[in-house]
Amino acid sequence: MASIFQKVSEVLGKFPWRAVSRYFGEFAIVFVGIYLAFLLTDYQEELRERKVRVKFYEKLIREFDSLAGHLELEEQKLLKHLAIVEEIEKGNSVIIPVSDLIFAFRGGIVNAAFEGGNLEAIDSRILGAIVTGRPALETLDRSIEMFNQLTTELLPIQMADENCCYDEEGKLVPHLEWYARLTRQIYELNRLLQIIVRERAIPDLEQSKQALE
């Protein structure tokens, strides 16, 4: 039995332990290096993606802020039209002015949100605000275009006959009731969009942006 252990000891003594140890050491270093490289690549990819999302959010914030400022300016014009509507409803025969309302928002960044991979990068709350606001934006655009056209066409008629817009009782004739209706509709849409942008979209964008930084 002793001879067997002696032979085993001799075999083990001749085994190139140092070489094997060095080999496994080098293998471990290579393995760890590859593993760390994968981790670094994933981290860099995540970092790039986060930077892209932050920049996209910053652009959306600027665009929404610009939209809110534009809506606030247009609201002042609408208040003047609402004052005229009130005068008409009081029975006063006033001239209906040509509308100078403007819809200057084209939403390049908002539209870009629905293209390519941008949709996946948007937080669901922000996406909800955008989806909610888009129909209102489109309706506002069409309403302003119609309002401007109708008031422009009405001006020469009023110039030719001051009383063309009112009946014998001083009430607005039925076919011109669109003036009060459109004025209120545009004003309400304007206010709705301001709430969506100022109270939902921008705060959510800023919160999501801060979470990525």
Image: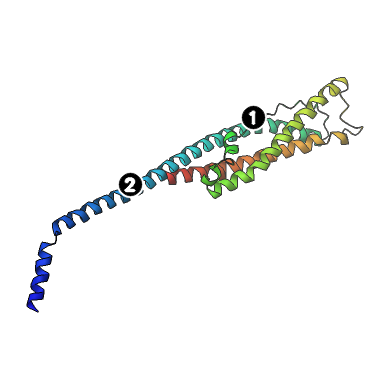
Q: Name the foreground residue: 166 vs 107.
A: 107
Dot 1 falls on a residue whose secondary structure is loop
Q: Name which quarter of the figure residue 10 lies in.
A: bottom left
137 horizontally vs 204: left or right = right
Residue 182: image location, x then y, percent? 76, 36
Q: Earlier in the sequence, mark 2 or mark 1?
A: 2
Residue 30 has which mark?
none
Image quarter hosting the N terminus = bottom left
Task: Please give the name of the residue rendered at 59% of the width and 33% of the height, measured from the top-left corner.
Answer: 108
Looking at numbered disc 1 in the image, what kind of residue is underneath it? Answer: Ala
128 horizontally vs 90: left or right = left
Residue 151: image location, x then y, percent? 79, 28
In this view, the residue farthest toward the bottom is 1
Task: Please give the name of the residue rendered at 18% of the width and 57% of the height, measured from the top-left corner.
Answer: 20
Q: Residues within 10 Å of mark 2 (few under 14, many from 20)?
A: few
Q: Nearer the viewer, mark 2 or mark 1?
A: 2
Task: Please give the name of the residue rendered at 50% of the width and 40% of the height, measured from the top-left corner.
Answer: 57
Q: Name the foreground residue: 57 vs 5.
A: 5
Residue 171 seen: no
Task: Please give the name of the residue rendered at 59% of the width and 45% of the height, measured from the top-left corner.
Answer: 129
Dot 2 falls on a residue whose secondary structure is helix
Per the image, the residue denoted by label 1 is: 104
Per the image, the residue denoted by label 2 is: 37
